[in-house]
Amino acid sequence: MTAAVGNIHSIIMKRITVLLVEDHTVVREGLRNLIELEDDFEVVGEGHTGREAVVQVKKLQPDVVLMDIAMPLLNGLEATRQLLKANPAAKVLMLSAHSDDAYVKNAIASGARGFLLKQSSARDVCLAIRAVHQGKQFFSPSISRRQERIQQLETKRTGGYNKKATSLTTREMEVLQLVAEGKANKEMAAELGIGMKTVEKHREHVMQKLDIHDTAGLTRYAISAGIIESSVQLTVV
């Protein structure tokens, strides 16, 4: 009888494992400290780029991934698509300092279960992690109030980011971000492990698909779509 009770107790007390992916060390450490105050949470890993997120999810199999949107090299939106392709059971909770409709819409389109503002209360962070772990959606209160309107707009718009960006391949999305971050073709080739001619071909395809034919336009598009936040983001390590 005692053993049975012990087994039941261990099942009930099974912790929700969390992977933190955030390029700002101070924010990441703050989240870790907040989360570890809860008895039912356990931070099993950390990362500061989208690439690290994809690798860590495969390795650690966390219950919930708390993912920043704007990160260098690979943003949270594309990282979410890639890790969900490899591990469809993963549950991603997107994190951002911005509540723009486009950011929220793109996060949902990437497969995220929720969208949490960085200025959220500790209570909302914990509620969000538990909700997405249970298969539910969670949005910060201010965003939640706009969801019905966002969904209505989604059905009406035909030329927005989702339609265009989802036509890009994974590699083209990576090239788009690196272009917006100001990387030269040689740097992109080294970062992605591909040849210069291949980079040029991907870059050309991105411009054709988005109907944007200059670097400045691609950068503005990437910022408006939440792929990068601003030029300030590019200097953060």
Image (cartoon, rainbow, N blue to C red):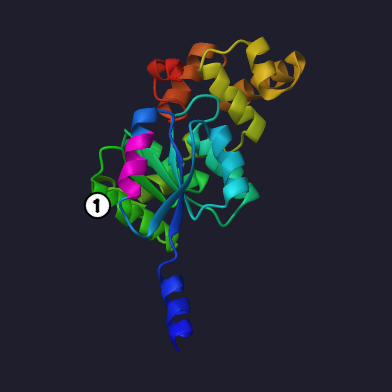
Q: Position of residue 141 (x, y in %)?
A: 24, 50
Indicate whether residue 215 is drawn in magenta. no
Q: Position of residue 12 (x, y in %)?
A: 41, 72
Total marks shown come to: 1
Give the amino acid at mark 1: Arg
Residue at the image point whose x is 45% and y is 17% from the top? 234
With respect to residue 186, does 101 lie above or below? below
Residue in the foreground of this view, choosing between 59 and 87: 59
Instruction: Say if residue 69 shows up in the picture.
Output: yes
Residue at the image point whose x is 41% and y is 75% from the top? 9
Residue in the foreground of this view, choosing between 172 and 73: 73
Indicate whether residue 33 is drawn in magenta. yes
Please state the extent of the stretch shown in magenta in the rendering: 28-36
Q: Which residue is mark 1?
A: 123
Helix, strand or loop for disc 1:
helix
Q: Main secondary structure of the magenta part?
A: helix
With respect to residue 214, does 88 lie above or below? below
Residue in the foreground of this view, choosing between 138 and 123: 123
Q: Residues within 10 Å of mark 1 (few under 14, many from 20)?
A: few
Q: Quadrant of the N terminus?
A: bottom left
Q: Position of residue 156 (x, y in %)?
A: 41, 45
Residue in the foreground of this view, choosing between 120 and 27: 27
Residue at the image point whose x is 61% and y is 40% from the top? 55
Residue at the image point whose x is 57% and y is 23% from the top? 176
Q: Position of residue 161 (x, y in %)?
A: 48, 34
With respect to residue 38, does 167 lie above or below? above
Instruction: Say if residue 159 shows up in the picture.
Output: no
Extreme-bottom residue of the structure: 1
